[in-house]
Structure formats: structure tokens, C-alpha cells
Image: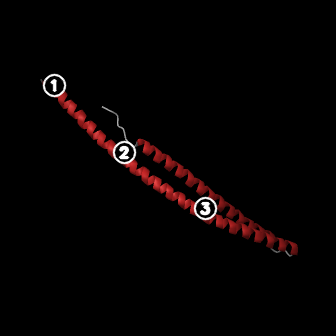
Amino acid sequence: MKKFSFELEKVLEYRNFEKETAEGELAKALAVETEINNNLKIIAQQYAETKSSMKGSKNFDDIVSQGQFNRLLDYQKEELLKQLAEAKLVTEQKREVLRECMKKTIALEKLRDKRKEEWKEAADYEEAELLDEAKKMKTI
């Protein structure tokens, strides 16, 4: 009996490669988002630390410095928020690419499984036919 062979196996392998590549690209995009979010948390901590350290201060130079530092933090925060918005768009695009790759891969896997089941049924039928024929030969 011959071994099962799926005629689109190379295509399926390529689709799996595309899917794995898309998964890697999505992971990279999510890592960028995570890094930006971490930087935003650092800025929030810096705000809190500055506010805490300046509580009750009457030193004019410290107050001016704090104001300048807060403006710098505001600018950094705004830039990070713009980057985050762009990163989210990229992430969504990468998700969509992965979804499409998964659809194509799943469709081919289902086709392979269906063909394998048909092959198995045909092989089982052929085997049963051979057994019947062998039994008939014994009785003769």
C-alpha cells in the first residue's frame, strides 16, 4: 500500500512559513507598543517624583526648574502618545496579515485532513478486498 501524499504539501509548508513570519512580525509590533507604554509609565513616575520632591518648596529656582522639567515631560509624553497611536495601527495591520495567513493555512490543513481521510478509507477498502480475495483463494 502506498504512503499518503498530499499534492499541496509544499504550498502548505509555504503557508506555514508565512504564518510563522506574520507571528514574528506581530510580536515585534507588540514589543514596540510595550516599550512605548513602559516609557509612558516612566514619565508618569517622573511627574510623581518631581511633584513629591517639590511639595512645600519655596525656592524660586526649584519651582522654575520643576516647571521646565514638567514641560519637557509633557512634550515627551505627547511624542510617545503619537508613537503609540502609530504603533497600534502597525500592530493592527500585522494582526490582519496573521489572520489572513491563518485562514489560508487552516483551509489547506482541512483539505489535507479530508484527503487523508479519503485515502485511509480507500486503503481500508482495498485491504478488505484483498482479505476477501485471500479467503476465497483458501477455500478453493
Q: Residue 11 at x, y = what percent?
A: 43, 45
Distance of label 3 from label 2 (alpha carbons) = 37 Å
* Count of picture labels: 3
Question: Which residue is tagged 2?
Answer: 112
Q: Secondary structure at mark 3?
A: helix
> Quick one: quadrant of the N terminus?
top left
Does residue 59 show up? no
Distance of label 1 from label 3 (alpha carbons) = 73 Å
- Nearer the observer, disc 2 or disc 1? 2
Q: Amino acid at mark 2?
A: Arg
Residue at x 21% of width, y 30% of height: 131
Does residue 132 show up? yes
Q: Dividing the picture into quarters, in which one does residue 73 lie?
A: bottom right
Q: Secondary structure at mark 1?
A: helix
Q: Residue 125 at x, y = what percent?
A: 23, 37
Question: Which residue is tagged 1?
Answer: 137
Residue at x 54% of width, y 57% of height: 94
Distance of label 2 from label 1 (alpha carbons) = 37 Å
User: In the drawing, does residue 140 fall left or right of residue 70?
Assistant: left
User: In the drawing, does residue 30 fall left or right of residue 122?
Assistant: right
Q: Earlier in the sequence, mark 2 or mark 1?
A: 2
Q: Dividing the picture into quarters, in which one does residue 12 lie?
A: top left
User: In the drawing, does residue 23 fall left or right of residue 67?
Assistant: left
